Amino acid sequence: MSEPATPFDYEAAVLACARGERYALRALYEREAAWLLGVAMRIVRNRERAEDVLHDAFVQLWQGAQGFDPALGSARGWVYTIVRHRALREARRGGRELSLDPQDLDDVADLQQAAAPAERGFDAQTLERCLERLDDSRRACVLHAFVDGYTHEQIARRLQAPLGTIKSWIRRGLASLRECMA
């Protein structure tokens, strides 16, 4: 799936949602739904539940768009955060053990900084290319943390590696992504 050549103004779309302009919600949905559904599916591991998560996230986005503050981060990051949090909540409800470590919160901020170039027009191929440049262990850790929603401890168990090593791989992976995408 390739992205359109014209840049999409996520901030303007979210702010238009805050003003009640339905076309903006539709534009956001058309632009991001496939990617957001993928994020939700990786976390809840069930298409029907992921579709429910996506629906609920867009309702939340529509109803809460007035709460978006551009000074606190990118609009695209805000949209993805809503979906990710909804999916994590749904996964917890479904019995999947997910707990958040304070270090995970720092990493979320780091990933959002790394993804900031998205607001300047980078595409999915750039992200894929940058992820491919990471060594296997760093790439796995970053994807487990930010796509699957695992905590550092869960990743350490899954990869059978020391917790400190996992934290280091995530930090270095994020730094490499930030540099590659700059």
Image (tube, rainbow, N blue to C red):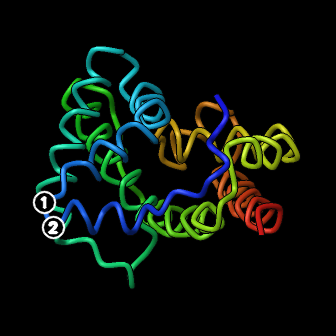
Q: Is residue 41 above or below residue 123?
A: above
Residue behind mark 2: 19
Circle 1: residue type:
Gly
Q: CA distance from mark 1 to mark 2?
A: 4 Å
Toward which corner of the image does residue 117 lie, by quadrant? bottom right
**102 vs 87: above or below:** below
Give coordinates of residue 1: x percent, y percent: 64, 28
Figure quadrant of residue 65: bottom left
Q: Are marks 1 and 2 in contact (CB under 8 Å)?
A: yes
Residue 90: horizontal and vertical position, in percent? 23, 33
Give residue 102's position: percent from left, percent from top.
42, 66
In the image, 161: left or right of 56? right
Name the residue at 77% across, 70% down: 182
Q: Which residue is mark 1?
A: 20
**Image location of residue 47, percent across then percent down:** 35, 15
Q: How many marks?
A: 2
Q: Residues within 10 Å of mark 1 (few under 14, many from 20)?
A: some
Q: Determine the residue positioned at 16% across, 50% down.
A: 60
Q: Which of the pair 17/78 is nearer the observer?
A: 17
What is the secondary structure assignment of the residue under circle 2? loop
Q: Amino acid at mark 2?
A: Arg
Horizontally, residue 144 falls left or right of residue 175, namely left
Q: Closest to the observer: 136 or 56? A: 56
